[in-house]
Structure formats: structure tokens, C-alpha cells
Image: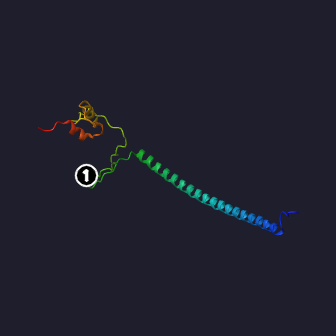
Amino acid sequence: MRIVAQTKTDKKTAKKEKRDSAKAAQKALDRAEKAVRKARKAVARSSEELRTRAERLAHESQQLSATHAAATRRGDTPTYDQETENPTPLPTAAPRPRTSVRKVRTAQAPKPSTPTLAELRTQAKERKITGYYRMNKAALLAALTPPPV
């Protein structure tokens, strides 16, 4: 008994699937090429805009530099309003807030009148108060101060 590997219809189906997959691959390749062309165009347009902007900024900075140099050579001083007695005040920059985390050390700070939490815990430990470590500062103060008579 002989088994036939493929029938004619199977061969046709295989051929058609091969042709369809080749078409699909070609379509995908065409889409990819189109996307690449579009991206290159966008990059070229963006580069041109950036070059134009850079040239304009360079020109403006040259003009500002020349103006500054000329003002420095002349020794320009601030102008005052001649018609009024009071000169127009020059604009001053607002003081910048400190951004440093470090504290500025001054003379020895006076010791606070109330003891610190660590000091209170030490006192509570010496007096053998139970649960002193879980108490907050107010509770420790209350536990350590004698009741009024």
C-alpha cells in the first residue's frame, strides 16, 4: 500500500500560501520603507529649523555682546530722571532664598528649658517607670513630675 505525500489540491494550497506570504512580506517592507522616508524628511525639516534658530540666536548674542562692549567702553552710568528731584531707583534683584540644608552656626545656643526626650527617658529609667520607652515627651513629663499637693 502506497501513501501519497501530497495531493494536487494540497500542492495548490501550499503554492498559494507561499505566494500570499511573499505578498504580505513585500507589503510590510513597503510600509517600513515609507516610514523611514517619512522619518528622514521630518529629521531634515527639524534640522533645518534648528540651524535657522541657532543662526538667529548667534546673531542676537553678537549684537548684545557689541552693545555691552560699547556701553563698557563709554562707562555708562545709570540715568536719572532730570525733571524730578528723586532719581529713579535702579531695579534690584530680590534676595534669593537659601537652598542649603546646612545650618548656620551662631554663638552657643542656650539650652532649652525643657529636657529632651532622651534626657526624659534616662530619668524615667533611673526611676524605674515601666513602659517609659513607648511614651512620648508629654507623657514622660507627666510621669516624671510629682502630682500637686
User: Measuring 64% from the left and 58% from the top, which residue is drawn there?
Assistant: 40
Residue pushed farthest bottom? 9
Q: What x and y, as percent, mark residue 100?
A: 37, 41
- 49 horizontally vs 74: left or right: right
Q: Is residue 146 above or below residue 87?
A: above
User: Measuring 25% from the left and 30% from the top, which residue is drawn there?
Assistant: 126
Q: Quadrant of the N terminus?
A: bottom right
Q: Quadrant of the C terminus?
A: top left
Q: Is residue 11 above or below residue 51?
A: below
Q: Quadrant of residue 117?
A: top left
- Which residue is at the front of the view, 95 or 39? 39
Q: Residues within 10 Å of mark 1 (few under 14, many from 20)?
A: few
User: Measuring 26% from the left and 40% from the top, which residue is drawn there?
Assistant: 137
- Identified by mark 1, the residue type is Asn
User: Measuring 56% from the left and 58% from the top, which residue is drawn there?
Assistant: 49
Q: Quadrant of residue 105?
A: top left
Secondary structure under badge 1? loop
What sort of colour scheme is used for the picture?
rainbow
**Mark 1 — residue?**
86
- 41 horizontally vs 124: left or right: right
Q: Is residue 65 above or below residue 118?
A: below
Residue pushed farthest right? 1
Residue pushed farthest top? 126
Residue pushed farthest left? 149
Q: What x and y, as percent, mark residue 131?
A: 28, 37
Tally of numbered tags:
1
- Which residue is at the front of the view, 49 or 129? 129
- Which residue is at the front of the view, 76 or 121? 121
Q: What x and y, as percent, mark residue 21?
A: 74, 64
